[in-house]
Image: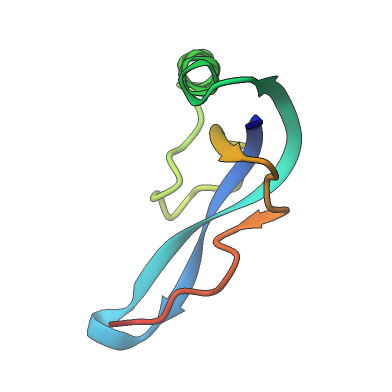
Amino acid sequence: MRYLVALYEIDRAYGGPEEGGWWFDTGELVRLLALAPTEARAQALAERANRLLDRLQRHRRHVDSVLYDGGRFTAIVYEWTAPAAFPETRPQYA
């Protein structure tokens, strides 16, 4: 099996007006960071990348801030292929 560590630029999107309005997390693929033979190795690489990203982005606004203007990234592990964006389908209010 093959595991990928992918780098995504994250953001928030408006979900709808229900319950006073709700938002959901989104991300666009920036690049593939690594290939790993096991899930454990891929998770370790993603955790290391996210620790470094946390340090590099500590002065950037958080995604949930109304003043957020982009520029935050996260590493995510996928099996076989990484989608171009997440979520792949728009969530529905339940």
The color scheme shown is rainbow
Residue nearest the viewer, comparing 2 with 23 = 2
- Horizontal arrangement in the rendering, residue 42 relative to residue 91 (left or right): right
Q: Residue at x 33, y 78 (%)?
A: 21
The image quarter containing residue 45 is top right
Query: What's the residue at 46%, 15% (across, down)?
Result: 51
Picture layout, residue 22 above or below residue 36? below
Instruction: Where is residue 53? Give x, y as percent.
Output: 54, 20
Is residue 28 rendered to the left or right of residue 51?
Answer: right
Q: Nearer the viewer, residue 68 or 28?
A: 28
Q: Nearer the viewer, residue 61 or 52?
A: 52
Q: In the image as oriented, which residue stretches furthest toward the right?
A: 31
Q: Residue furthest front?
A: 1
Considering only vertical position in the picture, is 73 above or below 87? above
Q: If the image is split into quadrants, where does the N terminus sit?
A: top right
57 displayed left or right of 31 = left
Snapshot quadrant of residue 38: top right
Residue at image location 66% in from the left, 31% down from the top = 2
**Residue at coordinates 46% horizontally, 19% vertically from top-left?**
40
Image height of 33 relative to 52, above or below = below
- Image x and y of residue 29, in percent: 71, 45
